[in-house]
Image (cartoon, rainbow, N blue to C red):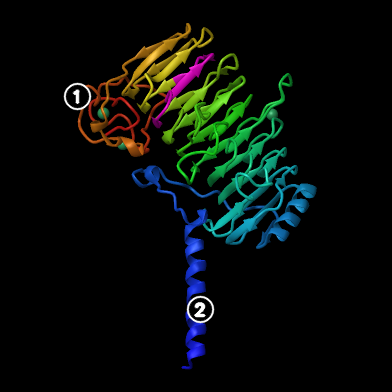
Amino acid sequence: MSKTSRLSILIISLFVLCISLIFSCSESSTEPQSDLQDTSNCVLTPLPGPTGPTISVRSVAELVSAVQQANASGNVTILLENGIYTLDEMLWISGSNVTFRSRSGNRDAVIIRGQGMDGGVSHIFNVPGDHFTIADMTIGWVANHAVQIHSDADNPVIHNVRFVDTGEQMLKVSYVPGDDTSSDNGLVEWCVFEYSAEIGPQYYIGGIDAHQAHNWMIRNNIFRHIRSPEAELAEHAIHFWSESSYTVVEQNLIINCDRGIGFGLGDRGHQGGMIRNNMVYTTRDVGIGLENSRNTAVYNNTVFTENYMNSIEYRFSRTQGGAIINNLTNARIASRDGGTARVETNITNARASWFANAQRGDLHLVRVEPTVIDQGQPLAEVSQDIDCEMRPQGTGYDIGADEI
Ligand SMILES: [Ca+2]
Ligand SMILES: [Ca+2]
Ligand SMILES: [Ca+2]
């Protein structure tokens, strides 16, 4: 082999090495750790296959064209081949019954991204259409929201989607103040919401931020590092307010976030709903907060709170008629500003050593605490634990999200 060709091979090898290093350091390579799924008996059931017309796409141009077609006709499933789709502008979804999913079903193999949190792409999906579905992909690197569901868009399904690095709240459900139109019956399941730098770009961020939304179900998701770098707090990992109602939040894992789960905020309250079997680890503020939230049930959650005095708060005089039962926390369960609730069989002196790995948000019990095991009260609405194990085991309900 000549000296020149050896040199060429060396240069090519270095080039390939550089490219692969750049690729492996890019955000797409960060495989989320499946803390919840791995320790769980819960089974992720893929969505059923498409029944109507489908369009396959393998480039941004094909994707944009498919969206135009879907908006015109409705009732289309757009199947994305594996790859990275880098948008120049957001996708506006006004058609009804439009579905986006990876053909492979591999969440990490289809990435739709913007131009970064400081870039010119505000959203991936901005959705005024009903029956919008996305499944089995990764989305993010946008200036505002990865998904915005408008107030007149009912029945959205967001299934097995990884949300990463958004300049504002990752999933927004918006409303028009003074107009009672609401987004109804949303389902968000098996998703991951996270910041790759383990902290957000500014305080005005959050996981799910929903206004005037009714009958939404948020289950089996992981929220990580939704934290503000500033003095002002980030919004909650899961926040339903502005008179949202009947939200069910269950079996979610919230790790290293400023705030955990919020129903209501200040005057903009919440009606009914259920928060059960969640594990919540917050580092600056409350784990579960009810503010002007009426008739809300908070059952069998485990909350580990650092740098704040209360794990669970029920706050303001319109917080009434609810029940806070069988929760396991390391800090207080407290009323503020006239909030009232039935507060029974909770344990509020948990220690980090009781849990598998509190600092990583794994709040599974690792020791048989006599005050916790079999000491809860039976609740008809809590038939299983965060791992989909039946309750009760042994002689009674365990306190907290984990039945052992
Ligand atoms: Ca509606
Ligand atoms: Ca038990
Ligand atoms: Ca368990």
Q: Which mark is residue 13?
A: none
**CA–CA distance in space, label 1 to label 2:** 66 Å
The residue closer to the viewer here, 280 or 20, is 20
Which residue in the protein does label 1 denote?
370
Number of numbered discs on residues? 2
- The vertical placement of 129 against 280, above or below, is below
Lower position in the chain sequence, tag 1 or tag 2: 2
In the rendering, at what x and y percent does residue 343 appear? 37, 13
- Residue depicted at x 34% and y 34%: 390
Quadrant containing ligand 3 reads: top left
Residue 251 shows in this picture? no
Q: Is residue 388 magenta?
A: no
The residue closer to the viewer here, 242 or 13, is 13
The residue closer to the viewer here, 194 or 347, is 194
- Secondary structure at badge 1 equals loop
- Secondary structure at badge 2 equals helix
In the rendering, at what x and y percent does residue 283 appear? 40, 30
Please, what is the three-letter code of the amino acid marked with disc 2?
Ile
Q: What is the quadrant of residue 165 in the picture? A: top right
- Check the image and name the residue furthest to the right: 72
Tell me the magenta residue range: 278-297
Kindly check if marks 1 and 2 are in contact, taking CB atoms under 8 A apart as contact: no
- The vertical placement of 21 against 93, above or below, is below
Q: Which mark is residue 11?
A: 2
In the rendering, at what x and y percent does residue 93 appear? 72, 44
Please, what is the three-letter code of the amino acid marked with disc 1?
Pro
Quadrant of image for the C terminus: top left
Left/right placement of residue 63 relative to residue 308 reads right
